Image (cartoon, rainbow, N blue to C red):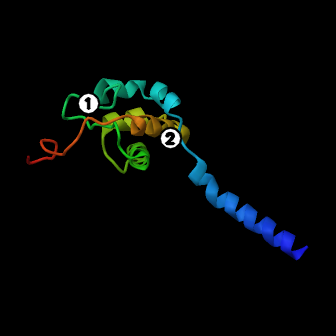
Amino acid sequence: MKRALTLLSFGMALALVATPLLAGGDPANGKTKAAACFACHGADGNAVDPQYPRLAGQYYGYIQQVLHEYKDGRRNNPIMKGFTATLSDQDIQDIAAYYSSLPTKLDTLQGHVQGD
């Protein structure tokens, strides 16, 4: 009996720890939810205008973090704050999954770093 309770406790703890690791976004849903982003960042995530970041191939976690920072005001950009204001956590996961799944056109940072 004691062994069964120990195994059950261990299983429950493992499930609680693993749940966030298994959560993720859906790139297909993200493409739909990111439609407003296409005007500046491009449908393929490779913005043509250098004032807008290229999102294609960025890290999934980084895109999520940045979107949350715009949403809660840690990053101050009125345009991005407006776009992120209505996004749910799932929307952010889906958008991050979409852009992180795309191939990037940046092969080097030459010409893309301020001061180059």
Q: Nearer the viewer, residue 22 or 107?
A: 107
Kind of element beneath mark 2: helix
Rendered location of residue 32, percent (x, y) = 48, 25
Kind of element beneath mark 1: loop
Q: Please report whichever mark, 1 or 2, sits nearer to the chain's N-terminal start.
A: 1
Amino acid under disc 2: Gln
Would you say 58 lies left or right of 91 here? left
Instruction: Residue 93: give its label.
Output: 2
Instruction: Residue 75: give its label.
Output: none
Q: Residue at x 36, y 51 (%)?
A: 74
Q: Is residue 24 visible?
A: yes
Rendered location of residue 83, percent (x, y) = 40, 32
The quarter holding residue 46 reads top left
Crowdedness of circle 2 by 10 Å Cα count: few (<14), some, many (20+)? many
Rendered location of residue 44, percent (x, y) = 34, 28
Residue position marked by numbered label 1 in the rendering: 47
Amino acid under disc 1: Ala
Q: Residue at x 50, y 41 (%)?
A: 93
Residue ranking furthest to the right: 1
Rendered location of residue 7, percent (x, y) = 79, 68
Compared with residue 55, is residue 61 higher up or lower down, i.e. above or below?
A: below
Q: Is residue 85 visible?
A: no
The quarter holding residue 15 reads bottom right
Would you say 21 lies left or right of 36 here? right
